[in-house]
Image: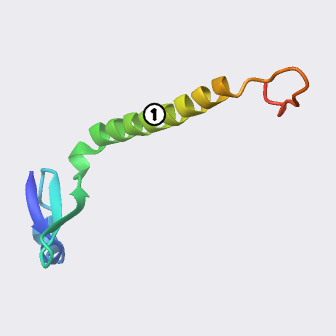
Amino acid sequence: MINMTLTSLRNTTNFFDIDDVATIINGRKKEEIGYFVPKIFKEEFEKFSAELQKKKKRKILEKVLKASRKDKIEDGAVSDGIE
C-alpha cells in the first residue's frame, strides 16, 4: 500500500501511474483521509463493497426482526397492516 498526501494528488503524472491501493493522508494534520483504489482492482473492490453493503443491510434487518418479536400483537391491539 502506498501513502500519498493531498499535494501529491495534484501531480497527476505520478498519481495515475500507481498500480497499488493508496492511502491518502492530510499532510498538515498527519491524518488518514481515505483510500484510492486503481482501476486494476475495480472488480475485486466492487465485490468487496457489495458484500459490505449486504452486511450493513442484514444488521438493520436483524434489529427490525428483534424489535418486531418483542412487539407482538395481542387481543384488542390494532395491527399496522404489515403481514
Identify the residue at image location x=9%, y=50%: 1
Q: Quadrant of residue 42?
A: top left
For this rendering, which residue is in front, 70 or 22?
70
Q: Residue 33: horizontal and vertical position, in percent?
A: 23, 64
**Location of residue 42 with respect to 16 vertically, above or below:** above
Q: Secondary structure at mark 1?
A: helix
Which quarter shows the C terminus? top right
Q: In the image, residue 45 lies at what x, y percent?
A: 29, 42
Residue nearest the viewer, comparing 71 with 63? 71
The amino acid pointed to by label 1 is Lys
Q: Say which of 40 and 81 sits in front.
A: 81
Q: Nearer the viewer, residue 59 or 47?
A: 59
Q: Residue furthest top?
A: 75
Residue at image point 32% right, 37% down: 48
Q: Position of residue 13 (x, y in %)?
A: 12, 71
Give the answer, above or below, for where 48 lies relative to 38.
above
Residue to which mark 1 is pinned: 54
Question: For this view, does 45 lie left or right of residue 8?
Answer: right
**Tell me, what colour scheme is on the image?**
rainbow
- At 12% from the left and 50% from the top, the residue drawn is 20
Residue found at x 60% / y 33%: 64
The image position of residue 58, as x and y in percent, is 49, 31
Quarter holding residue 63: top right
Tally the marks: 1
Q: Is residue 36 left or right of residue 48?
A: left
